[in-house]
Each structure stands twice: as C-alpha cells, then as structure tokens.
Image: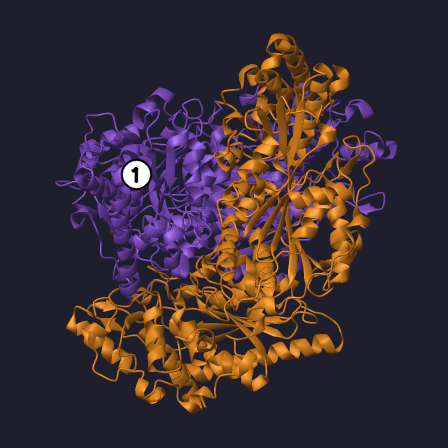
Chain colours: A purple, B orange
Amino acid sequence: MLEKLNDYWKACCYLAAGMIYLWDNPLLKEPLKPEHIKERLLGHWGASPGLSFVYVHGNRVINKYDLNCIFIAGPGHGAPGVIAPAYLEGTISELYSQFSQDEEGMKNLFKAFSFPGGLGSHCTPELPGSIQEGGELGYSLAHAFGAVFDHKDLIAITVVGDGEAETGPLATCWHSNKFLNPVRDGAVLPVLLLNGYKINNPTILSRIENEELISLFKGYGYEPYIVEGEESLEVHEKMASAMDSAVEKIISIWEEARSKNKPFRPYWPMIILRTPKGWTAPRKVGNHYVEGYWRAHQVPFSDAKENPKSLEVLEAWLRSYEPQKLFTPEGKLREDLRDLAPKGEKRMSATHYANGGLLRRELKLPDLKSFAVSVKTPIQDEAENTRPLGLFLKEIIRLNPDNFRVFGPDETKSNRLDAVFEFGKAWMAKVLPEDEDEGYLSPFGRTMEMLSEHTLEGWLEGYLLTGRHGFLNTYEGFAPIISSMVNQFGKWLDISSDIPWRAPISSLNLLLTSVVWRQDHNGFTHQDPGFITSIVDKWPNVVRVYFPPDANTLLCTAWHCFQTTNRINIIVIDKQKHPQYLSIEDAFKHAMKGIGIWDFASNHPEHEPDVVIASCGDIPTKEAIYAVRMLKKLFPELKIRFVNVLNLFTLTPNTEHPDGLSDREFDSYFTKDKPVIFNFHGYPWLIHRLTYRRNNHKNIHVRGYRENRKIGIDAGYLAPFLKGRGGITTPLQLAILNQIDRFSIAMDVIERVEALQDEGGYYKDLLKNKQIEALEYAYNHGVDKEFDETEL
Amino acid sequence: MLEKLNDYWKACCYLAAGMIYLWDNPLLKEPLKPEHIKERLLGHWGASPGLSFVYVHGNRVINKYDLNCIFIAGPGHGAPGVIAPAYLEGTISELYSQFSQDEEGMKNLFKAFSFPGGLGSHCTPELPGSIQEGGELGYSLAHAFGAVFDHKDLIAITVVGDGEAETGPLATCWHSNKFLNPVRDGAVLPVLLLNGYKINNPTILSRIENEELISLFKGYGYEPYIVEGEESLEVHEKMASAMDSAVEKIISIWEEARSKNKPFRPYWPMIILRTPKGWTAPRKVGNHYVEGYWRAHQVPFSDAKENPKSLEVLEAWLRSYEPQKLFTPEGKLREDLRDLAPKGEKRMSATHYANGGLLRRELKLPDLKSFAVSVKTPIQDEAENTRPLGLFLKEIIRLNPDNFRVFGPDETKSNRLDAVFEFGKAWMAKVLPEDEDEGYLSPFGRTMEMLSEHTLEGWLEGYLLTGRHGFLNTYEGFAPIISSMVNQFGKWLDISSDIPWRAPISSLNLLLTSVVWRQDHNGFTHQDPGFITSIVDKWPNVVRVYFPPDANTLLCTAWHCFQTTNRINIIVIDKQKHPQYLSIEDAFKHAMKGIGIWDFASNHPEHEPDVVIASCGDIPTKEAIYAVRMLKKLFPELKIRFVNVLNLFTLTPNTEHPDGLSDREFDSYFTKDKPVIFNFHGYPWLIHRLTYRRNNHKNIHVRGYRENRKIGIDAGYLAPFLKGRGGITTPLQLAILNQIDRFSIAMDVIERVEALQDEGGYYKDLLKNKQIEALEYAYNHGVDKEFDETEL
C-alpha cells in the first residue's frame, strides 16, 4: 500500500518537474533533447514535493475514514505540487478539456504552466480545490479556520510553510484554536512543512532545537506529531501513522464533545513534517547544493537547454521517477494508482467546500422597517448611527444561526453593535464568573473577537469562500492594517468572477467606524481615512464604497450589501450620536440611487442653484447642512442645492465603474458651471481623482481631512489655533482645523458666489468670529459649545 | 525599601487617576466637589498602574546595577502610567515649564492630559523617553529590538500588553531573539503585562493554562519568570526578585559572550506580570466589576461629576493613595521618594537613547563615482538597475560598521543587493555547513532577513529612533503589508519635527523593487503599485517618492536620501537589466532637480514641441523612449519633448509640497497647451490627483497600471488578447495589456497631434499590427521578441 502511495507521489513529483521544465516529450519516450526544454523556466520546485506528499496522505485518510477534507496550501508558490494531484485525480481534465488524461493533455499541462494565458504558478482561483492562492504569505491558517467554522464535518488539511510561519499574521493565527468549538465546528489539521529554507535563507523554525519547537506548539495549544526523514518509504510510513493518529484524535474529540454536547478545548493535533527542501531533486549540481538547500526553492538549475551536462542531470532526475512505470503509454495514470484517489466530490480538488458558492444559501434578512429610526424632524432628531445596525445584525444571526457570523477586533461594543452579543461571543478558553456581566462568552457565540485584524479578515475570507456570510467591523483608522489582505482578496474575487465553474460567493462586508473625525482623545494615530483611497484604485467589478449619512441609510446599505456576491463592500459611518435625515422609505430610495438632491436641506430648490453644496460622509454632511442653515439666514435669496453622495462611485464616469453616473446625470446634480463646495469624509484629492473628467470639475472645491494642515495654504488666520495641531480635539475643533466645519463652508460659499461679493466681507468676518469663538471655547473647556444659525 | 517603592508607585497611580479625573484640587486639600471634576473624562486607566509598576521597578534596577535602560510601553493607551513617573523624576518639568513640580504644575498636568492642545493620551512624541506611541498596537517588541541592536549596553524594558500580544506583528516578533547577538547588541527585557482584558474582552494569553503560557514562551526561546498577585507589597517583592534575576541573567549572558567574544543564543529572560486590570481602582462600582475587569480599561466610571455617590467613590479611591503623605504641601514629591529615581540621563524619561537624534552620527558615504555604471551609448547600454546600489550599500556598511544595517524580508539577493552579504547575514540560530555557500550567516552579519515585513519595519524604526541609519528593501507588491506601520511612523516623524527638544533622526529609506511590471510568473498577487498612492496623501514635510530611471540616478537618489533626516524616502525601481541613460554626472544633476527634459530622447529639442512625452519609473521610461524612436522614424519632422520625472512631488504645486514646482516651472516642462502623454509606473489617476490644478491638466493623458483593464474603455482591439488577463505575462505583454508600451504611446501621439491626423491612420495600423505581432509571439513562445524602430 505504501509502495503504491509512493508511486502516486512520484507521479506528482514527475508532473511538477515536468511543468517547470518540459515543452515536449512529456513521457520521456525519447531521450531528452534541448528542444524539449522550455525556452523560459519558471515556477517553484522547493515546496512542491512536500505539498504533493501531504496531498496524497490526505487522500489516504479521506478514503480510510470517509472524511470530507479541503486542502489549503500555505506555500502557494509550490503550485506544481498541488496542480499535479488535482490533475491526476481527474478534476482538472473535467474542467479544462485541453488538459486531458493522455500524452497530449500532459504536454499541454506542462506547456501551460507558468506560461502566458496558461496556469498560474500559485494556487490561483483557476485551480480547482483552491481557496487560497498563497501569493502574499501568511493567511493559510486563518483561511482554514474560517473554512471549518460551522462546517462540523470538514477537516482542513493545511500546509503551513516554514517561511510563511515567520509572518505576523500566521504567527498569531495558531491561537484560532481558542475559538474552535468541536461540537459545531470542523477541524484544522495543520502540517508545518519544515523544509528549512525560504528564497535565500534558512527558516527560523527549522533552526531552533526540537525541544523549543515542540514547546512552542504546545504553548499554542497543539499536540505536535513530528515526522522527519529523507528516505521516502520510511517517511511515508511515519506520515501515514501520524495522519492516522491525528485524524483519529480529531474524530475522538468530535465524538466526545458531540455525544455530550459539551464543547471543550483539547490539544488539537498538528504535524511537523521535516523533509528536505526540493525533496527528490539532485542533491548537488556542479558545486552547489540543490536538494535540501535554498537553491531548490525556485527552478533548481536553469541551464538545461544550453548545457549538455545539466541536460543529462535533468534527464537522470526525471527518469528517477520512472514515468514509464507510473503512466500508461497513452499517458494515463496506472489504473491501480488511480484507485488511490477519493472519488467524486470527496476529491479535495472537487469538493464543494472549496467552491463555496455551490453551498451558499441566501442570507435570510428580517424586514428592515422594524429597525428604522423614526425621523420626525430631520436634522433635529438624533441617534447613534450604528446602533440600529446592531439590532439588525442580531436578527440576522437569529434567522441564520449556522451560516452567518460577526467579526470585530474587540471593538464591536465600542462600535455600538453590541446587540449581537445576545448570541454570545465565541470563546473556548477559560471563563470566569465576571464574564457574565455583559456580552457573555460562549463556545456557541456568533461574534468573533480577537485583537488581530489579520486573523479576523482571514477567518471571514475563509468563511465566505466556503459558502457562508459575514460582517466585519473595525475602526477606520486601523483598517489599513489589512489593506494588503483586502487587496489580495479583491484580486481573488476579480479573477473568480470570470471562472465559469466558480459559483459566486457572498460579498466581504466591512464596516469602518469610529471614524477619523471622532478621535477626540485618541489623537493622530487613530486619524486615518486612507483605506478608502487605497481601495478605490482597484477592480471596479468588485469594490463598492458607501458613506451612508445616517442610521436609516446605513440599514438600507447593509441590507443591499448582504444580497450581493463577489464584492468587497466598504461602509463608512461614525458610531456616535448624529442628526438623522431620512425616514426609512426615503433612506431606501437614497441608498439604492446612491446620490440625491435633498430639498429639505436646500434653499429654493425649485430654482437653478447659485451654488451646490455637496457632502459625502455623516459628519461632513452634518456640517454642510448647518452651513446651509446659516447661509439661509444670512442670504435668504441665495439658491442653494444640497447634494448628498452615499455611493462614492456614482462620482466616477460610467465608463469606468458600473455605478458611475453618465456625464449628463452628473451635470444634473452638480451643474455645468456653478461653484460646488464638496464636503468630504476623507482626503480631498480623492474626489478630484474621481471627478477630474467631469464638465464642471474646475468649479468643484473639495474639503476633507488633510495631513498637511500645518503647511496648508489655507491655514491663514487659523494658524494661531493649531495648538497641538489636532492630536486631541473636540469634534468641532477637528472639523475647523480641517475646514470642513459649517463656518468654513459658509465662508467659502460667500467667496465663490459672485452675487455675494459686495456684502460678503461683513458676513465673512461675522462667521470667522463665530468660528474663532468656537475654537477658543473648546480649547478652554475641552468640550464644544455648538453654534448654529440661531446665533447669527 | 519596598515600602518606599510602593509609595513611589502610589504617587504614580494617584497622578494617573488625577490626570483622568481632576480639573482642580490636585492635592485633595479640600473635600472633592463636582467642580473639581473635568467636564469630559478621557483616558485609559486599565494599563496605567501596571505600566507605572514596571517603570518604578525599572528605576530600582537602573540604580542597583547602574544600567542604561529605555522604557517601551506597548499599551500606549496607558500613557498616564508613563507620564506620571516621567513627571515625578522631573524630566517633564524641565522640558515644559507649565508642568512644574508644585501644586500649580500638578494641576496643569492634570488639566492638560487628554485635553485639546495638551498632552496626548498615548505615549506620543511629546512625552520624553518615549519612542513608541502605542496607538496602533503590535510594534513594541520590534521597536525594542531595533533599539538595542548595536547598543551593547542598553536594556529595553518593554511592556507588552496582553491585548497587543494577540496581534500578528507582535506574535512573530518574539522570534527577534534569533537575531540578537549578546556580544555586540544590548538586551530586551519583555514584561508581558497580563492584566487579563482588552476593551471589552478577556485576552487569550490570560485565559490559557499557565503550563501552556510557559511552554509558549520557552518555545519562543525565553525563560519566563512569573510574577502574580494583587496585594501590592507582596507583588513588589516578587517583582523585585524577578527583575534582579532577569537583569543578572542578562549581565551574565553579556559577560559570558563578551569575555570570549563568542556569541551564543541563550534563553533570554522575560517576565510575565499577572496583576488585575486597573489595579488599585475600586473592585466594584454599583453592580459592575471595575478593578480586575474590562470596565477598568478606560475611565472606570464616568458619572462622578453628576452622581454624588460616584463622587464619594472617587474621593475614597483617590484618598486611598494618601496623597498628603506622598507629596509636600507645595505639591512636590517627598524628598526620600525622589531619591528613588535615577539621576540625569539615567532617567528613562531623559535618556538620549530615546531621543536618538542626539546620538546620531552622520553616515559616512563613499564617493559615488566608483559605483557608477559607465554609460557610453545611452539607451543601448544595459545594466541591472539595483546591483550598483548593492555595492554602494556594501561600502556604507564597511564605513559604518556599528550604526548602519540593511533590512529585507528574504529578498535582498533576489533584489540584486547581495553584495552586502560580504558582511554576512545576522543569524543566531543553528548554522549548517551548507550555509557557507553564499551570503553566509553570522552573529555579526549586517543584513537582517526575516520573512516578516512587520518585524523588519519595526526593527528599522527602533534602530533609527535610537540614532542610527538603515535601509529596507522589499518587493513593491508586498509593501502594502506595512502601509499602516509606515503611516504610523510618518505621523510620529511629522509631530517630532515640531518638538524643539527632539533631535532629528535619520530618515526611513525604503526601496520598492521587483516592481509591478516584472511579475512575469508571479501573477496578480505580486502586481500592486498601490503603496505609493497610499503614501502621497500624507505629510508633505515627511514623505518623498522617487522613481530613478536607471542605475546611476538610483545611486544619486540613495546618496541624497541617506543625508536627510525625519523623512520617509520611498524609492521605486526594478531590479532587472534595463537600458541606462545618464552618466553619473548627469544622473546627479537629474536626481537633485527631480525632473528634467532629456534632449537625447527628444526630437528637435531646440524647438517648441508639438507633443510632450513624459515618463516616471524605469520601465515606463524605457517604453516611452522606444516610442519616441519609432515616431522619429515615422515622422522625422515631429517635435517631441521628452520629460523624465524622478521626484514624484515635483508634479505637485509648490504651495502643497516643498518639492513642488511653481506653475510657471511646471509649464516650462509640460507647456500650457500641448498634448502630454504621461507614461507612469503606478495607477494613472495618481498623476491626475497631483496635477489637476495645473494649467495644462486637461491635455495630460496618463497611462499606467490599471486593475480594470477588463472593462476598461480602451480594451478595444486588445480584447481578444486578454487571455489570462495578465496574470502570467512576458514584460512586453504586460506593458501592452496596460497600454504603457511603445506602440500604444506612439499611436496615442498620432491621435493627439493635430498635424498628424491626415496620414495618421496608416501609421496607426502599422503600429497596431506590430503590437499584435508582439503579443502573439509572447503567447506562443513565453518570451518577448523585442521590436523597435528599426523594424518599421
């Protein structure tokens, strides 16, 4: 049996090497010649044999124990080692007819690997069975845990590379076992592939004492099984035994917990597999070590086409796998070997768990209306913007008890979403009596909180990729921590959307709250609206950015987001008490349209405007509305149009983003020639970047958060008040320092509207004095005394 | 002695509580009244007592063993616990006269804390002794290790919060001990402050078994000393003993290693301090737990001004510290207590190590010329752009053997900088014979490689903040991993630059290479020029972005960057073989100016141009130059001006960035009305964002990397060639798919220049056919066949 397994593995290794080197002669029916070698050699050999090794042992236990498994390849650069078994078990041929199970198909596979228009050299979305590409390292374990939450019969066999293991996200993610409930969740079986080298360096974990290594993983809460060696049959035997023990341990944990419905946190099994880097490649080529050294990381040697000696080495190496014994003359895997692979959807390359859209059930959503804030007097009525969303989320949890979770880095309560705690916070570590106080901890909790944005983002991605729904809330200022992860996930979604056999998955919904404008004592470190800027440059078919101005529009936006697929929906709104504007009915229309003229906030809306005041974001909207009210009082005849932008991408030309307005529509809001004062939540340049092609762009004056207010051209009379420069502020102070406040906007309007030029100076001074008064009051009292038009 | 220490600590706790609550009556000379309470209560109590506790024990060992220490507060939100001892030992009063050592000064301190224009509620740059703010969590250990590298007499007493400990960056950073050489480096003494709670949740490390906890830290390579308890005198005793043991262990490690000049990796000591959250606050207020619970995290209870009962609780709490016994009636700390603090620069709040600019020596730089690439025939001569920089860096290491290091996540060789390996790679873990092969590992190595961008960035920051120089190289596509860290560091630099007593530190120099345009087989995951976009919105006095077009300009740019202070210098350039343009003399002028007209790449440069072709970035420059050559051949009369932009911020108006050109200067390069084809390295919108205010903006047509090429309006005839959409490509293919290639630019010029309209159609077709030919060749062969003007 193990001999056969070894042959199956040799077939994988042969294919992996073939993908890297061979242009022709795929079965080595003739002696190897230079013209059989690819013109350009690309790909990573180093981790490939190890990945295939784990894969074939996964196959063995799937058959033996009738398991449902997915395979997650941390070292995604070793894709040949994953493509090979996925091809051998037939899935690739079923989805891509050119890669058939014969000589021609094998030749095509070799040729297409890492070739323009062909198969990627990581575990890309095109590779069936993959839910993690592994291009940017560090997220395999998080994806694995996300995949098995609420999938009680699933085991994620997860190869963690020892390079990847050095990254921060991976290093903390081992602690995910403090959130895994064996009653309702599946299991992750991590295999730490200790092959010793990265691109050009040894790995840390391969160069510490075994004692330290074991201690580390015990400390992480695992029971490590060590498998090490170089002689393949011997290592097969050890690995089979370790895999059996690990799987039996998992099954017994499940049984124990489930039979009594008593969740507990065991030492979960894990495997440390210490084998040579580039295992089975030649040990030395020329004077350089290859197998077992970092030189085996990518293409072990590159001159086989030009150097006859290297060609010889390559041929000997390839023939060492004895392809003629593994494959039929037609190029099909030997029949007795084919029997080793699981069948149908049990194949890890064909499991629906790795094509989660197939498992996805639509999220059941409660009626929005019951969560609506009643808005009797717009502007005057106030509410905490995010609190109704918390109630909405709570009901979603109730209606979807097994396929929806809320994620947050210890901020869910701070973000006013704590209604979701009715269903507990997931927690498998020790519990103390005081934990009952509020937001109780429970193995069955539906909210996941850990102080690692990376882990949460990774869990959520894994959860979505395997067919479920989720919602992540975080402080806006710390969203940049995961900007690279969100980028990578966006790339995955973008490509996936084009792959016919990949069913769409639920969107990634990300709430950014505790926003830049309300960091009253957290200071500069918490002021950063840059995440939005970094995401708008990305894939128009994937990214959406919403700035609901109040509680009801937030509800409607979230309701919409939950029904979309294959998107990244970013929602930005503050958590604190703010004015409310729209009834739930109006909010719904506004949210669906994404942009609107607000008559109630305009002046003489029946006329063509003298000036357009636009806002995007809840706090800038509030200040802009107060500016209009002051202007109304000072200049009752002034015709002001108030425009609110909720869906940021409406600003983009429709040729560039599906949500973009046509130029004609855009003009119907912003006119072709009137001054527009645009009060924005984030960096002001972003609005220019989105609108620079619009007819009226030269008249659009944007205000927003500026890091350079110190040397800003506009500091002027505010300069003496830049004490502390806005590190600690009251809300109005921070608005004034960035000139998004009501006074600044009103003054700006006076300056921009020609008809007001004559009398403007007097009123500008009036406003300036009020503004300085507000700043000074805040500096003296530490709180705001709010000013509005009644004081003018 | 411990009683006195306890009194000193009580004084700290009293001050910390005072900062959070008191507006007046700082010494509680009268009964506490509502008007003595601040109108708005802000600040974090939770970690404050623990931080002060560690601080005063740090003081004790500094005196006892005559140590040099810095104090790094991971939980920076507990700033009151750090401000308090810094005030008590006099440093704050020396730097800020309003916070004098008397009742008035104490009152001012209380009032100013977390108050507009006052002292921040984290360990901000304004706080003497701080080198880490702790707003964004996770970087304390990395800063600590960075601080002690090459500071052989320094101990960084580093409080790691148990919340922070859950972050990825912190979790992997424990492994930094694999890079710490006791012969030449100082030591980090981590104190894991296990107070059990975050904002709203217990912490993971506080809720696992002690056995797991100890095992974890042994696995990380430490010897943990556990100190736990609630009764303060008892805990003082345990802590004093643990600190003594830890310090003696460190000293003995140093002595052993140094006496024989034999570096080894010991189990370094660390302390696990398990005390209640918000220690010494009331245990219960109303029905809620406070001390020892998450409710103590921020302001323990907030209604003291309104609720007489709470006022009573607060008064009792504050009086429990017995301020009248700790302070003289004038408000000065009791004299015998003052003796407990170290003196002068031994004070952790006054040490020069935490004001690194004071220790900074200018970097010795070798003569640039000896590294120059000889450029005999511009364009035709080729070189690997980064390799000469590697040689330059190697010489810098030689000239600055103890205060300069190179950092990279396992990519220094891949990035062609491996000349620096002449001085070895730092490595304290096991070494094997094959490690000698190339780039040898050594405890004394000057290049630091670990596969954690977070750790490297944190090390480098710590190294710079304590007065040294450094250089970080990384793949452009993965720079976003640290974009939030770079942001946070930028904020620190921005604020620091305004603090008169903070001496300027060396700039953070960051090379982004292996750029988006050369990810031939790494695919989409490695294609991301977004880091640049995220950084340009930040502080103009801090951020610089350079795109040297060739090897010599790179050398000159780096040479310049090394001489700047308090900046973040981003340099973007590819590592592979590319055309060379400028001799070292011309390169120097070009780099210093940041922008230039290249006559050698223009056509009829003596005339006003018909069209301006501009480039920014090495690969877009190459393609743009080839476009000019083709246009010259097709339209010999066409007047083309070639502009190269090296310093990105020259494009910004000089009112917004110190490196910006005035409008008049800008026009002198880009004209007021001629078409400009701008070939850019990154997302094209960035150029619009920088230039939208310029006179000729409407004529600037930017080409760059686009994520949306699938639905891009310009796909047109390229659509059939979007096979694989550019995941795996040849270099020219990727250029063509994004239309930054020579053919696209030439066609664009034909389209934009009115004079060419008549005959243009024919030539456009010619170019289009050449372009399609190039694409097809690449699809068939996997390599490029380069086309140039000679084929036309």
Residue at 17% from the left image edge and 68% from the top image edge: B306
Q: Which chain carries label 1?
A: A
Q: Nearer the viewer, residue A338 or A377?
A: A377
Q: Nearer the viewer, residue A459 or A128?
A: A459
Can you say whether B392 is above or below B712 in the image?
below
Residue at 31% from the left image edge and 30% from the top image edge: A594
Outermost residue, left side: A376
Can you say whether B265 is above or below B591 in the image?
below
Give the x, y percent position of residue B495.
48, 59
Q: Mark 1 points at which residue?
A: A749
Q: Is residue A293 visible?
A: no
Give the x, y percent position of residue B480.
53, 45
Q: Nearer the viewer, residue B134 or A39?
A: B134
Number of marks drawn = 1
Residue at 68% from the left image edge and 24% from the top image edge: B607
Q: Can residue B284 be seen in this view?
A: yes
Residue at 43% from the left image edge and 59% from the top image edge: B135
Residue type for callout 1: Val
Q: The N terminus of chain B appears in which quarter of the rendering?
A: bottom left
